Image (spheres, helix red, strand yellow):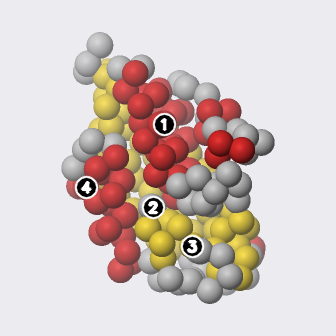
Amino acid sequence: MNLRIGQGIDFHRLESGLKLWLGGVAVPSEKGCIAHSDGDVLLHAICDAMLGAAGIEDIGHQFPDTSNEYKNIDSKILLKRSFDLIKKAGFSVGNIDCTVCLEKPKIAPYIPEMRSLISAVLETSSENISIKATTTEKLGFIGKEEGAAAIAICLLESRQ
Ligand SMILES: [Zn+2]
């Protein structure tokens, strides 16, 4: 079996009054991410980790934010399209490990739903999708609730 590893990182600015989409779930929050798409920082990091592991160009290249096709798009569609690309390249998902960096709200109650949504799209079991969360102890732009970040590491398997 051929194994390939990839990493992805994403950042978005936060603004009051926007919906906060994380891991495909609308998390109740005072602030949401500013973006061309729905701003799902976690799904974007996962897309880039998968594409990177497969050696395919990144999410910004696949789904340009200058295209009207992707305006306000549900990032689960971007996740599905990224998965289709890695599948076409002969890969399946081994496991993915992610960390969301956000001062608030606490996302732990929503993680099981995120894992189940993501694993369904990626045709794997939810034990293969790990999602963790951390704050930055009020430090920097994340600590000041000006932005959110996510990091993902992905292992792909190929039977070629
Ligand atoms: Zn993004």
Please report contact status of discs 2 and 3: CB closer than 8 Å, yes or no: no
Is residue 155 in view?
A: yes
Please report contact status of discs 1 and 4: CB closer than 8 Å, yes or no: no
Please tell me which of labels 1 and 3 falls first in the chain. 3
Residue 81, percent across and down? 47, 37
- Type of the residue with mark 3: Leu
In the picture shown, does residue 85 fall above or below 121? above
Q: Give the secondary structure at mark 3.
A: strand
Residue 110, percent across and down? 37, 75
Give the distance between the C-alpha atoms of the residues marked 2 and 1, in whole angstroms: 15 Å
**What residue sits right under mark 1 in the picture?**
82
The answer to which of 72 and 137 lies nearer the viewer is: 72
- Type of the residue with mark 2: Gly
**What residue sits right under mark 2 in the picture?**
23
- Which quarter of the rendering shows the N terminus? top left
Q: Is residue 25 left or right of residue 8?
A: left
- Type of the residue with mark 4: Ser
Task: Tell me if the residue at label 4 has its CB under 8 Å from ligand 1.
Answer: no
Please tell me which of labels 3 and 4 falls first in the chain. 3
Please report contact status of discs 3 and 4: CB closer than 8 Å, yes or no: no
Residue occupying the point 42% across, 36% down: 83
Give the distance between the C-alpha atoms of the residues marked 2 and 4, in whole angstroms: 13 Å
Is residue 136 in view?
A: no
Residue occupying the point 30% across, 69% down: 112
**Residue positioned most to the right:** 66
Give the distance between the C-alpha atoms of the residues marked 3 and 4, in whole angstroms: 22 Å
How crowded pointer 1 is (Cα within 10 Å; few <14, some 14-19, many 20+) is rated as many
Please tell me which of labels 2 and 4 falls first in the chain. 2
